[in-house]
Protein backbone atom coordinates (compact mmCIF):
# COMPACT_ATOMS: atom_id res chain seq x y z
CA UNK A 1 0.00 0.00 0.00
CA UNK A 2 2.83 2.39 0.82
CA UNK A 3 5.79 3.32 -1.30
CA UNK A 4 9.24 1.78 -1.13
CA UNK A 5 12.39 3.89 -1.29
CA UNK A 6 15.67 2.66 -2.75
CA UNK A 7 19.03 4.39 -2.81
CA UNK A 8 20.75 4.66 -6.17
CA UNK A 9 24.24 6.08 -6.54
CA UNK A 10 26.28 7.21 -9.50
CA UNK A 11 28.82 9.75 -10.68
CA UNK A 12 27.89 12.80 -12.68
CA UNK A 13 30.12 15.76 -13.44
CA UNK A 14 32.73 16.19 -10.73
CA UNK A 15 31.00 14.60 -7.77
CA UNK A 16 29.30 11.49 -6.41
CA UNK A 17 25.54 11.79 -6.09
CA UNK A 18 22.81 9.70 -4.60
CA UNK A 19 19.15 9.75 -5.49
CA UNK A 20 16.36 8.44 -3.36
CA UNK A 21 13.90 6.78 -5.76
CA UNK A 22 10.30 5.95 -5.01
CA UNK A 23 8.53 2.82 -6.15
CA UNK A 24 5.04 1.44 -5.74
CA UNK A 25 1.80 3.21 -5.04
CA UNK A 26 1.86 6.88 -4.13
CA UNK A 27 4.58 7.31 -6.76
CA UNK A 28 3.41 10.73 -7.97
CA UNK A 29 3.56 12.60 -4.68
CA UNK A 30 6.60 10.73 -3.42
CA UNK A 31 8.45 11.15 -6.70
CA UNK A 32 7.89 14.91 -6.68
CA UNK A 33 9.17 15.23 -3.14
CA UNK A 34 12.17 13.07 -3.98
CA UNK A 35 12.96 15.29 -6.93
CA UNK A 36 12.66 18.47 -4.88
CA UNK A 37 14.83 17.21 -2.03
CA UNK A 38 17.31 14.94 -3.81
CA UNK A 39 20.79 15.71 -2.51
CA UNK A 40 24.38 15.40 -3.58
CA UNK A 41 26.30 12.85 -1.62
CA UNK A 42 29.57 14.14 -0.20
CA UNK A 43 32.83 12.22 -0.22
CA UNK A 44 36.21 13.08 1.26
CA UNK A 45 37.63 13.47 -2.24
CA UNK A 46 35.09 16.09 -3.40
CA UNK A 47 36.77 18.96 -1.55
CA UNK A 48 39.86 18.66 -3.76
CA UNK A 49 38.05 18.16 -7.07
CA UNK A 50 37.18 20.89 -9.54
CA UNK A 51 37.54 22.24 -13.04
CA UNK A 52 39.20 25.57 -12.23
CA UNK A 53 42.89 26.38 -11.75
CA UNK A 54 44.16 26.01 -8.15
CA UNK A 55 46.39 29.00 -7.43
CA UNK A 56 45.13 30.79 -4.28
CA UNK A 57 46.75 30.54 -0.83
CA UNK A 58 45.27 31.21 2.64
CA UNK A 59 46.80 34.70 2.50
CA UNK A 60 45.15 35.34 -0.88
CA UNK A 61 41.80 34.22 0.53
CA UNK A 62 42.10 36.43 3.62
CA UNK A 63 42.84 39.43 1.42
CA UNK A 64 39.89 38.49 -0.81
CA UNK A 65 37.68 38.53 2.28
CA UNK A 66 39.01 41.87 3.52
CA UNK A 67 38.71 43.20 -0.02
CA UNK A 68 35.04 42.23 -0.20
CA UNK A 69 34.02 43.25 3.33
CA UNK A 70 35.61 46.67 3.76
CA UNK A 71 34.00 49.08 1.36
CA UNK A 72 30.56 50.65 1.25
CA UNK A 73 29.87 49.64 4.85
CA UNK A 74 32.72 51.47 6.49
CA UNK A 75 32.88 54.43 4.10
CA UNK A 76 29.13 55.03 3.60
CA UNK A 77 26.68 52.98 5.69
CA UNK A 78 28.32 53.60 9.08
CA UNK A 79 27.45 57.30 9.07
CA UNK A 80 24.03 56.87 7.49
CA UNK A 81 22.90 54.19 9.97
CA UNK A 82 24.20 56.25 12.91
CA UNK A 83 22.38 59.39 11.74
CA UNK A 84 19.04 57.77 10.96
CA UNK A 85 18.71 54.64 13.10
CA UNK A 86 21.08 53.97 15.99
CA UNK A 87 22.99 57.13 16.96
CA UNK A 88 26.27 56.48 18.83
CA UNK A 89 24.94 52.97 19.53
CA UNK A 90 25.93 52.12 15.98
CA UNK A 91 28.86 50.37 17.65
CA UNK A 92 26.33 48.09 19.38
CA UNK A 93 24.65 47.50 16.00
CA UNK A 94 28.01 46.33 14.67
CA UNK A 95 28.35 43.98 17.64
CA UNK A 96 24.93 42.41 16.97
CA UNK A 97 25.54 42.09 13.23
CA UNK A 98 29.05 40.80 13.96
CA UNK A 99 27.77 38.05 16.26
CA UNK A 100 25.35 36.89 13.58
CA UNK A 101 28.17 36.92 11.05
CA UNK A 102 30.55 35.12 13.40
CA UNK A 103 28.10 32.24 13.81
CA UNK A 104 27.55 32.11 10.06
CA UNK A 105 31.31 32.35 9.41
CA UNK A 106 32.03 29.35 11.61
CA UNK A 107 29.32 27.41 9.78
CA UNK A 108 30.71 28.51 6.41
CA UNK A 109 34.20 27.45 7.46
CA UNK A 110 33.02 23.97 8.42
CA UNK A 111 31.05 23.41 5.22
CA UNK A 112 33.71 24.97 3.00
CA UNK A 113 36.31 22.58 4.43
CA UNK A 114 33.92 19.63 4.11
CA UNK A 115 31.83 20.08 0.97
CA UNK A 116 33.92 22.53 -1.04
CA UNK A 117 32.91 23.50 -4.56
CA UNK A 118 32.56 26.87 -6.25
CA UNK A 119 28.88 27.36 -5.33
CA UNK A 120 29.27 28.56 -1.73
CA UNK A 121 25.96 28.31 0.19
CA UNK A 122 24.25 26.89 -2.89
CA UNK A 123 26.60 23.88 -2.91
CA UNK A 124 26.22 23.39 0.85
CA UNK A 125 22.44 23.50 0.57
CA UNK A 126 22.53 20.93 -2.25
CA UNK A 127 24.55 18.54 -0.09
CA UNK A 128 22.59 19.05 3.12
CA UNK A 129 19.02 20.10 2.33
CA UNK A 130 18.25 19.09 -1.24
CA UNK A 131 18.00 20.43 -4.78
CA UNK A 132 15.01 22.75 -4.40
CA UNK A 133 16.33 24.50 -1.24
CA UNK A 134 19.70 24.74 -3.00
CA UNK A 135 18.11 26.40 -6.03
CA UNK A 136 16.28 28.88 -3.80
CA UNK A 137 19.46 29.82 -1.98
CA UNK A 138 21.39 30.03 -5.26
CA UNK A 139 18.69 32.33 -6.64
CA UNK A 140 18.98 34.46 -3.48
CA UNK A 141 22.76 34.64 -3.89
CA UNK A 142 22.39 35.78 -7.50
CA UNK A 143 20.16 38.62 -6.24
CA UNK A 144 22.54 39.47 -3.41
CA UNK A 145 25.66 39.73 -5.52
CA UNK A 146 24.11 41.38 -8.57
CA UNK A 147 22.39 44.14 -6.59
CA UNK A 148 25.39 44.60 -4.29
CA UNK A 149 27.87 45.07 -7.13
CA UNK A 150 25.60 47.46 -9.02
CA UNK A 151 24.84 49.49 -5.88
CA UNK A 152 28.50 49.74 -4.89
CA UNK A 153 29.35 50.80 -8.45
CA UNK A 154 27.01 53.79 -8.05
CA UNK A 155 28.74 54.71 -4.77
CA UNK A 156 32.12 54.32 -6.44
CA UNK A 157 30.97 56.73 -9.13
CA UNK A 158 30.25 59.40 -6.53
CA UNK A 159 33.64 59.06 -4.83
CA UNK A 160 35.40 59.01 -8.21
CA UNK A 161 33.72 62.23 -9.28
CA UNK A 162 34.58 63.85 -5.94
CA UNK A 163 38.20 62.90 -6.58
CA UNK A 164 38.09 64.53 -10.02
CA UNK A 165 36.73 67.71 -8.47
CA UNK A 166 39.42 67.71 -5.78
CA UNK A 167 42.27 67.08 -8.22
CA UNK A 168 41.19 69.10 -11.26
CA UNK A 169 38.60 71.51 -9.90
CA UNK A 170 35.79 70.04 -12.00
CA UNK A 171 34.04 66.70 -12.31
CA UNK A 172 31.84 65.04 -14.87
CA UNK A 173 28.58 66.74 -15.92
CA UNK A 174 25.47 65.64 -14.02
CA UNK A 175 23.95 63.90 -17.04
CA UNK A 176 26.93 61.46 -17.01
CA UNK A 177 26.47 60.68 -13.30
CA UNK A 178 22.80 59.63 -13.30
CA UNK A 179 20.65 57.23 -15.27
CA UNK A 180 17.58 58.34 -17.21
CA UNK A 181 15.13 57.01 -14.58
CA UNK A 182 16.73 58.77 -11.63
CA UNK A 183 15.30 61.96 -10.13
CA UNK A 184 18.26 63.95 -11.47
CA UNK A 185 17.36 62.85 -15.01
CA UNK A 186 20.69 62.05 -16.69
CA UNK A 187 21.74 59.85 -19.61
CA UNK A 188 24.00 57.26 -17.98
CA UNK A 189 26.07 56.85 -14.83
CA UNK A 190 29.25 56.58 -16.88
CA UNK A 191 31.81 55.90 -14.10
CA UNK A 192 29.64 53.10 -12.67
CA UNK A 193 29.22 51.57 -16.12
CA UNK A 194 32.93 51.75 -16.90
CA UNK A 195 34.21 50.34 -13.59
CA UNK A 196 32.01 47.23 -13.84
CA UNK A 197 33.19 46.65 -17.43
CA UNK A 198 36.85 47.12 -16.42
CA UNK A 199 36.58 44.64 -13.54
CA UNK A 200 35.01 42.12 -15.91
CA UNK A 201 38.02 42.38 -18.20
CA UNK A 202 40.33 41.90 -15.21
CA UNK A 203 38.48 38.80 -13.99
CA UNK A 204 38.56 37.29 -17.47
CA UNK A 205 42.35 37.18 -17.22
CA UNK A 206 42.23 34.65 -14.38
CA UNK A 207 41.92 34.33 -10.60
CA UNK A 208 45.59 34.90 -9.74
CA UNK A 209 45.81 38.19 -11.66
CA UNK A 210 42.65 39.39 -9.94
CA UNK A 211 44.00 38.35 -6.53
CA UNK A 212 47.20 40.37 -7.04
CA UNK A 213 45.24 43.48 -8.00
CA UNK A 214 42.98 42.96 -4.98
CA UNK A 215 45.99 42.73 -2.63
CA UNK A 216 47.27 46.14 -3.76
CA UNK A 217 43.84 47.76 -3.34
CA UNK A 218 43.40 46.21 0.12
CA UNK A 219 46.70 47.72 1.22
CA UNK A 220 45.56 51.16 0.03
CA UNK A 221 42.18 51.10 1.79
CA UNK A 222 43.42 49.65 5.07
CA UNK A 223 46.10 52.35 5.13
CA UNK A 224 43.37 54.95 4.61
CA UNK A 225 41.36 53.57 7.55
CA UNK A 226 44.39 53.57 9.85
CA UNK A 227 45.13 57.15 8.76
CA UNK A 228 41.58 58.19 9.70
CA UNK A 229 41.91 56.62 13.15
CA UNK A 230 45.31 58.24 13.75
CA UNK A 231 44.13 61.72 12.70
CA UNK A 232 40.68 61.66 14.30
CA UNK A 233 41.45 60.13 17.68
CA UNK A 234 42.90 63.41 18.93
CA UNK A 235 39.60 65.21 18.19
CA UNK A 236 37.26 62.98 20.22
CA UNK A 237 34.51 64.74 22.17
CA UNK A 238 32.87 62.31 24.66
CA UNK A 239 29.73 64.48 24.75
CA UNK A 240 28.94 63.29 21.22
CA UNK A 241 28.35 59.81 22.66
CA UNK A 242 25.60 61.01 25.00
CA UNK A 243 22.96 59.70 24.98
CA UNK A 244 24.50 56.48 23.74
CA UNK A 245 21.08 55.14 22.66
CA UNK A 246 18.94 58.16 21.62
CA UNK A 247 15.26 58.06 22.65
CA UNK A 248 12.89 56.48 20.14
CA UNK A 249 11.11 58.82 17.71
CA UNK A 250 8.38 58.20 15.11
CA UNK A 251 8.32 60.09 11.82
CA UNK A 252 5.32 61.22 9.78
CA UNK A 253 5.23 57.91 7.90
CA UNK A 254 4.91 55.94 11.13
CA UNK A 255 8.48 54.57 11.02
CA UNK A 256 10.37 54.47 14.29
CA UNK A 257 13.99 55.51 14.66
CA UNK A 258 16.51 55.21 17.47
CA UNK A 259 15.85 53.46 20.75
CA UNK A 260 16.74 49.76 20.97
CA UNK A 261 14.61 49.02 17.92
CA UNK A 262 16.78 51.52 16.07
CA UNK A 263 19.84 49.59 17.17
CA UNK A 264 18.35 46.41 15.68
CA UNK A 265 17.33 48.19 12.47
CA UNK A 266 20.83 49.64 12.31
CA UNK A 267 22.27 46.14 12.66
CA UNK A 268 20.06 44.86 9.82
CA UNK A 269 21.06 47.86 7.69
CA UNK A 270 24.81 47.69 8.25
CA UNK A 271 24.74 43.95 7.69
CA UNK A 272 25.57 45.03 4.14
CA UNK A 273 28.96 46.02 5.58
CA UNK A 274 29.78 42.41 6.44
CA UNK A 275 28.83 40.93 3.09
CA UNK A 276 31.93 39.52 1.51
CA UNK A 277 33.43 36.87 3.76
CA UNK A 278 31.01 34.39 2.21
CA UNK A 279 32.48 35.25 -1.19
CA UNK A 280 35.72 33.63 -0.02
CA UNK A 281 34.00 30.23 -0.08
CA UNK A 282 33.24 30.61 -3.80
CA UNK A 283 36.98 30.23 -4.41
CA UNK A 284 37.00 26.65 -3.07
CA UNK A 285 37.97 25.14 -6.44
CA UNK A 286 40.82 27.62 -6.86
CA UNK A 287 42.46 27.04 -3.43
CA UNK A 288 45.77 25.25 -3.14
CA UNK A 289 44.62 23.48 0.06
CA UNK A 290 40.87 24.16 0.53
CA UNK A 291 40.43 22.09 3.70
CA UNK A 292 42.95 24.29 5.53
CA UNK A 293 42.93 27.58 3.63
CA UNK A 294 39.18 28.27 3.41
CA UNK A 295 38.53 28.41 7.18
CA UNK A 296 41.59 30.65 7.63
CA UNK A 297 40.42 33.01 4.90
CA UNK A 298 36.80 33.19 6.08
CA UNK A 299 37.36 33.58 9.82
CA UNK A 300 40.52 35.67 9.51
CA UNK A 301 39.00 38.26 7.19
CA UNK A 302 35.85 38.59 9.31
CA UNK A 303 37.86 39.08 12.51
CA UNK A 304 40.09 41.78 10.98
CA UNK A 305 37.16 43.70 9.52
CA UNK A 306 35.02 43.54 12.68
CA UNK A 307 37.80 45.17 14.72
CA UNK A 308 38.20 47.91 12.11
CA UNK A 309 34.44 48.53 11.96
CA UNK A 310 34.18 48.86 15.73
CA UNK A 311 37.07 51.31 15.84
CA UNK A 312 35.88 53.48 12.94
CA UNK A 313 32.24 53.68 14.07
CA UNK A 314 33.25 54.60 17.62
CA UNK A 315 35.69 57.31 16.54
CA UNK A 316 33.38 58.65 13.82
CA UNK A 317 30.49 59.28 16.23
CA UNK A 318 32.95 60.71 18.74
CA UNK A 319 34.38 63.50 16.57
CA UNK A 320 31.10 64.93 15.21
CA UNK A 321 27.43 64.66 16.35
CA UNK A 322 25.80 61.57 14.85
CA UNK A 323 23.02 63.69 13.32
CA UNK A 324 25.56 65.24 10.92
CA UNK A 325 26.70 61.93 9.43
CA UNK A 326 23.90 61.30 6.93
CA UNK A 327 26.05 62.14 3.90
CA UNK A 328 27.30 60.06 0.93
CA UNK A 329 30.85 60.19 2.32
CA UNK A 330 30.57 60.48 6.13
CA UNK A 331 34.21 59.65 6.94
CA UNK A 332 35.62 62.32 4.63
CA UNK A 333 32.91 64.79 5.69
CA UNK A 334 33.72 64.28 9.37
CA UNK A 335 37.40 65.00 8.73
CA UNK A 336 36.48 68.21 6.90
CA UNK A 337 34.37 69.31 9.89
CA UNK A 338 37.38 68.99 12.22
CA UNK A 339 39.63 70.88 9.81
CA UNK A 340 41.59 67.92 8.41
CA UNK A 341 40.98 68.48 4.71
CA UNK A 342 44.27 66.93 3.62
CA UNK A 343 43.32 63.67 5.33
CA UNK A 344 39.82 63.79 3.82
CA UNK A 345 41.35 63.77 0.34
CA UNK A 346 43.46 60.72 1.12
CA UNK A 347 40.46 58.97 2.68
CA UNK A 348 38.55 59.48 -0.56
CA UNK A 349 41.33 57.67 -2.42
CA UNK A 350 41.07 54.83 0.08
CA UNK A 351 37.30 54.75 -0.39
CA UNK A 352 37.68 54.39 -4.17
CA UNK A 353 40.15 51.54 -3.62
CA UNK A 354 37.84 49.96 -1.04
CA UNK A 355 34.77 50.03 -3.23
CA UNK A 356 36.81 48.69 -6.15
CA UNK A 357 37.86 45.57 -4.26
CA UNK A 358 34.31 45.00 -3.00
CA UNK A 359 33.03 44.94 -6.56
CA UNK A 360 35.92 42.78 -7.74
CA UNK A 361 35.48 40.04 -5.14
CA UNK A 362 31.68 39.98 -5.36
CA UNK A 363 31.93 39.88 -9.16
CA UNK A 364 34.31 36.93 -8.78
CA UNK A 365 31.81 35.28 -6.42
CA UNK A 366 28.70 35.56 -8.58
CA UNK A 367 30.46 34.12 -11.62
CA UNK A 368 31.52 31.06 -9.60
CA UNK A 369 28.03 30.60 -8.20
CA UNK A 370 26.47 30.72 -11.67
CA UNK A 371 29.19 28.34 -12.86
CA UNK A 372 28.36 25.82 -10.12
CA UNK A 373 24.58 26.03 -10.66
CA UNK A 374 25.02 25.52 -14.40
CA UNK A 375 27.39 22.59 -13.93
CA UNK A 376 24.65 20.88 -11.93
CA UNK A 377 22.25 21.39 -14.84
CA UNK A 378 19.95 23.92 -13.13
CA UNK A 379 21.00 26.63 -15.61
CA UNK A 380 22.00 26.20 -19.28
CA UNK A 381 25.54 24.88 -20.04
CA UNK A 382 26.55 28.32 -21.34
CA UNK A 383 27.16 29.43 -17.76
CA UNK A 384 29.62 26.62 -16.93
CA UNK A 385 31.91 26.93 -19.94
CA UNK A 386 35.57 27.32 -18.88
CA UNK A 387 38.16 29.09 -21.04
CA UNK A 388 41.06 26.85 -22.00
CA UNK A 389 43.46 29.81 -21.86
CA UNK A 390 42.68 31.18 -18.38
CA UNK A 391 40.75 28.29 -16.77
CA UNK A 392 38.08 30.85 -15.82
CA UNK A 393 34.36 30.97 -16.76
CA UNK A 394 34.82 33.84 -19.24
CA UNK A 395 31.39 33.56 -20.87
CA UNK A 396 29.50 34.06 -17.62
CA UNK A 397 31.88 36.87 -16.63
CA UNK A 398 30.94 38.73 -19.80
CA UNK A 399 27.20 38.02 -19.60
CA UNK A 400 26.70 39.00 -15.96
CA UNK A 401 28.96 41.99 -16.55
CA UNK A 402 26.63 43.26 -19.28
CA UNK A 403 23.65 42.90 -16.92
CA UNK A 404 25.38 44.76 -14.08
CA UNK A 405 26.64 47.50 -16.39
CA UNK A 406 23.04 48.10 -17.36
CA UNK A 407 21.83 48.14 -13.76
CA UNK A 408 24.59 50.42 -12.49
CA UNK A 409 24.59 52.73 -15.47
CA UNK A 410 20.89 53.26 -16.07
CA UNK A 411 18.68 52.30 -13.09
CA UNK A 412 18.10 53.89 -9.65
CA UNK A 413 19.31 51.29 -7.15
CA UNK A 414 19.11 52.95 -3.72
CA UNK A 415 15.81 51.23 -2.90
CA UNK A 416 17.20 47.82 -3.85
CA UNK A 417 20.18 47.83 -1.51
CA UNK A 418 18.29 46.12 1.33
CA UNK A 419 17.53 43.21 -1.02
CA UNK A 420 21.21 42.38 -0.75
CA UNK A 421 20.86 42.06 3.02
CA UNK A 422 17.79 39.81 2.92
CA UNK A 423 19.39 37.54 0.33
CA UNK A 424 22.56 37.25 2.39
CA UNK A 425 20.73 36.57 5.64
CA UNK A 426 18.70 33.87 3.93
CA UNK A 427 21.91 32.29 2.64
CA UNK A 428 23.40 32.33 6.13
CA UNK A 429 20.31 30.56 7.53
CA UNK A 430 20.71 27.78 4.96
CA UNK A 431 24.43 27.38 5.68
CA UNK A 432 23.83 27.07 9.43
CA UNK A 433 21.03 24.56 8.80
CA UNK A 434 23.34 22.67 6.45
CA UNK A 435 25.91 22.21 9.22
CA UNK A 436 23.30 20.63 11.49
CA UNK A 437 21.96 18.39 8.73
CA UNK A 438 25.34 17.15 7.47
CA UNK A 439 26.50 16.38 11.00
CA UNK A 440 23.49 14.11 11.32
CA UNK A 441 23.56 12.53 7.85
CA UNK A 442 27.37 12.35 7.43
CA UNK A 443 28.79 12.20 10.97
CA UNK A 444 32.03 10.47 9.93
CA UNK A 445 32.86 12.69 6.97
CA UNK A 446 36.35 14.23 7.43
CA UNK A 447 36.14 17.93 8.31
CA UNK A 448 39.08 20.29 7.91
CA UNK A 449 37.39 22.58 10.44
CA UNK A 450 34.57 21.98 12.90
CA UNK A 451 32.51 24.78 14.46
CA UNK A 452 32.79 24.56 18.27
CA UNK A 453 30.08 23.92 20.88
CA UNK A 454 28.14 21.30 18.96
CA UNK A 455 24.91 22.59 17.40
CA UNK A 456 24.91 25.78 19.49
CA UNK A 457 26.76 27.96 16.95
CA UNK A 458 24.61 27.09 13.90
CA UNK A 459 21.40 27.38 15.96
CA UNK A 460 22.47 30.82 17.19
CA UNK A 461 23.36 31.76 13.62
CA UNK A 462 19.88 30.80 12.41
CA UNK A 463 18.25 32.73 15.25
CA UNK A 464 20.28 35.92 14.80
CA UNK A 465 19.85 35.96 11.02
CA UNK A 466 16.08 35.41 11.20
CA UNK A 467 15.89 38.16 13.82
CA UNK A 468 17.68 40.59 11.52
CA UNK A 469 15.52 39.56 8.55
CA UNK A 470 12.37 40.40 10.52
CA UNK A 471 13.86 43.85 11.23
CA UNK A 472 13.94 44.74 7.52
CA UNK A 473 11.20 46.88 5.95
CA UNK A 474 7.98 45.46 4.46
CA UNK A 475 8.88 46.87 1.03
CA UNK A 476 12.04 44.78 1.07
CA UNK A 477 10.07 41.61 1.77
CA UNK A 478 7.62 42.41 -1.03
CA UNK A 479 10.39 42.90 -3.59
CA UNK A 480 12.09 39.77 -2.30
CA UNK A 481 8.84 37.83 -2.80
CA UNK A 482 8.65 38.93 -6.45
CA UNK A 483 12.22 37.76 -7.02
CA UNK A 484 11.50 34.36 -5.44
CA UNK A 485 8.42 33.87 -7.62
CA UNK A 486 10.56 34.49 -10.71
CA UNK A 487 13.05 31.90 -9.41
CA UNK A 488 10.29 29.32 -8.88
CA UNK A 489 9.14 29.77 -12.48
CA UNK A 490 12.66 29.09 -13.75
CA UNK A 491 13.14 26.06 -11.51
CA UNK A 492 9.90 24.31 -12.42
CA UNK A 493 10.09 25.43 -16.05
CA UNK A 494 13.72 24.43 -16.72
CA UNK A 495 15.94 23.45 -13.80
CA UNK A 496 14.05 20.46 -12.40
CA UNK A 497 13.94 18.73 -15.81
CA UNK A 498 17.58 19.45 -16.74
CA UNK A 499 19.18 18.70 -13.39
CA UNK A 500 22.19 16.37 -13.55
CA UNK A 501 20.61 14.36 -10.76
CA UNK A 502 17.44 14.04 -12.86
CA UNK A 503 19.51 12.74 -15.80
CA UNK A 504 21.21 10.24 -13.52
CA UNK A 505 17.84 9.12 -12.18
CA UNK A 506 16.50 8.60 -15.73
CA UNK A 507 19.62 6.66 -16.76
CA UNK A 508 19.42 4.47 -13.72
CA UNK A 509 15.76 3.76 -14.29
CA UNK A 510 16.16 2.83 -17.97
Image (cartoon, rainbow, N blue to C red):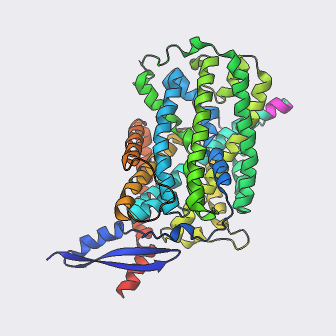
Q: Assess whether residue 230 is covered by the magenta stretch.
A: no
Residue 78 is situated, as x and y percent measured from the top left of the image, at: 58, 30
Query: What residue is at 80 percent from the left and 35 percent from the top?
Result: 164
Camera sees residue 196? yes
Answer above or below: position of 276 versus 314. Answer: below
State the count of labels.
Answer: 0
Answer above or below: position of 234 versus 182. Answer: above
Residue nearest the observer in this picture, 412 or 146: 146
Asked if residue 68 lies left or right of residue 190, the reply is: left
Asked if residue 452 lies left or right of residue 299, the reply is: left
Asked if residue 76 lies left or right of residue 127, the reply is: right
Q: Hey, which residue is sitting farthest right in the picture?
A: 168
Residue 10 is situated, as x and y percent measured from the top left of the image, at: 43, 80
Q: Pick the quarter of the image with the C terminus.
A: bottom left
Asked where in the image residue 202 lies, by quadrant, the reply is bottom right
Q: Hey, which residue is sitting farthest left in the picture?
A: 1
Query: What residue is at 72 percent from the left and 68 percent from the top?
Result: 390
Residue 478 is situated, as x and y percent measured from the top left of the image, at: 41, 44
Query: What residue is at 58 percent from the left and 67 percent from the top?
Result: 383
Residue 150 is situated, as x and y percent measured from the top left of the image, at: 61, 47
Answer above or below: position of 453 versus 3. Answer: above
Residue nearest the observer in this picture, 339 or 474: 339
Q: Pick the quarter of the image with the N terminus.
A: bottom left
Q: Mostly what secondary structure, the magenta segment?
A: helix
Q: Hey, which residue is sitting farthest bottom in the picture?
A: 510
Asked if residue 104 lies left or right of residue 77, the reply is: left
Camera sees residue 489? no
Stretch in magenta: 164-168
Amino acid sequence: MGEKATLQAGTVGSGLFYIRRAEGRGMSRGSLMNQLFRTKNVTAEDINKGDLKRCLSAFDLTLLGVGAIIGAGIFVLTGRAAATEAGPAITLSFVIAGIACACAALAYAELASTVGGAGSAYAYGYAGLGEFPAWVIGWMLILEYTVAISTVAVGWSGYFNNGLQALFGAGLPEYLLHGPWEAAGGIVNLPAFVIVAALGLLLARGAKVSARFNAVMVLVKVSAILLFLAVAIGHLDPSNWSPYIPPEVTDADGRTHFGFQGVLTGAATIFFAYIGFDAVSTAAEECENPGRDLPIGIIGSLAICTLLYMAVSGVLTGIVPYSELNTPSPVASALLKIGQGWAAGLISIGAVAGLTTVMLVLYFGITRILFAISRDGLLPPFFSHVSEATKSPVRVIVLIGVVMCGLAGFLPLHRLAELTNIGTLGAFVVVCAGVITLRRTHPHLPRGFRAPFGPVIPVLGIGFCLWLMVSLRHETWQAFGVWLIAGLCIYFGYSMRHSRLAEQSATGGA
